[in-house]
Image (tube, coloured by chain):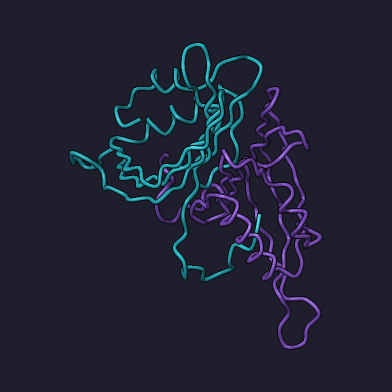
Chain colours: A cyan, B purple
């Protein structure tokens, strides 16, 4: 992702024909199937000139063939530059992610990714998130 | 959840000692392990007098022992009443969820739940969610 290598992203996602992948970007609805998911990454990468992930709180829950990896993604990113600037304004984002990986004959592949914004405590001017 | 039955929630979550569960409520950081997860449900239920889920877009991706279920949760909820009212104000929430289930000898159990708010398109007064 940081290198903007779309082919590598494509390889990372599970492609077994029987179990569709799913992906939720922060604030987005669910995307289902490789087509929708990979198109979303192409779109995001087209609008991102710079992105860097600082992962913290990485935790792994593992069986023989499936792993769930949760982490905090401290993201610094910038869109395309305007007015001849070298880089657009940089934006920081705090995201938590749940990633489900499946072991295949070619290695671990992403079966599901769900990222969501972390809303700072005490920042709930409207309603608190009661439940889900 | 709608019936406020904490014991039933407790039974639904995986408890195998080897593979910790994880849970993300909308806007929250990651909670890891049965202790943290179940405490969060106790807290949410203590602050929720009324909650109803209308599930849509339910999609299942299934292997022998693991299933990923994604859905949209159209939630209507209300906190404790104030000033002697019968029910607090009702709040609508649009949440998407990724749920990972494991098949055990006692049936399917929740291994991971990740819920996040859906931010309506065109509602990004600040930054768009570029990526995760």
Q: Residue B59 in the image: x percent, y percent? A: 71, 32
**Farthest bottom residue?**
B83
**Against A6, is A125 above or below?**
below
Q: Position of residue B66 (x, y in %)?
A: 66, 29
Quadrant of the snapshot with the N terminus of chain B: bottom right
In this rendering, the count of numbered labels is: 0
Splitting the image into 4 quarters, where does residue A132 fall? bottom right
Q: Above or below — where is A122 with respect to A9?
A: below
The quadrant the C terminus of chain B occupies is top left
Q: Percent position (x, y) of residue A102?
A: 54, 24
Eyeballing the image, is B31 above or below B85?
A: above
Q: What is the quadrant of residue A120 in the picture?
A: bottom left
Question: What residue do we see at 63% from left, 66% from top?
Answer: B43
Q: On the rendered structure, is B57 left or right of B38?
A: right
Horizontally, residue B37 falls left or right of residue B88, namely left
Q: Residue furthest front?
A: B17
Q: Nearer the viewer, residue A128 or B105?
A: B105
Whether residue B68 is situated above or below residue B23 in the rendered picture: above
Tell me if A17 is positioned left or right of A121 in this view: right
Q: Residue furthest top?
A: A105
Front one among B1 and A41? B1
Judged left or right of residue A86, residue A33 is right
């Amino acid at each position: 992702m940081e290198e903007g290598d779309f082919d590598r992203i494509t390889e990372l996602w599970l492609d077994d024909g029987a179990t569709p992948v799913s992906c939720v970007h922060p604030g987005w609805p669910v995307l289902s199937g490789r087509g929708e998911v990979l198109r979303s990454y192409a779109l995001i990468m087209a609008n991102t000139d710079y992105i860097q992930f600082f992962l913290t709180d990485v935790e792994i829950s593992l069986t023989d063939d499936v792993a769930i990896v949760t982490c905090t993604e401290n993201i610094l990113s910038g869109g395309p530059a305007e007015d001849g600037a070298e880089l657009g304004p940089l934006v920081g984002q705090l995201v938590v992610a749940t990633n489900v990986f499946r072991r295949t004959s070619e290695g671990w592949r992403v079966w599901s990714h769900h990222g969501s914004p972390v809303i700072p405590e005490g920042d709930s001017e409207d309603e608190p998130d009661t439940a889900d």
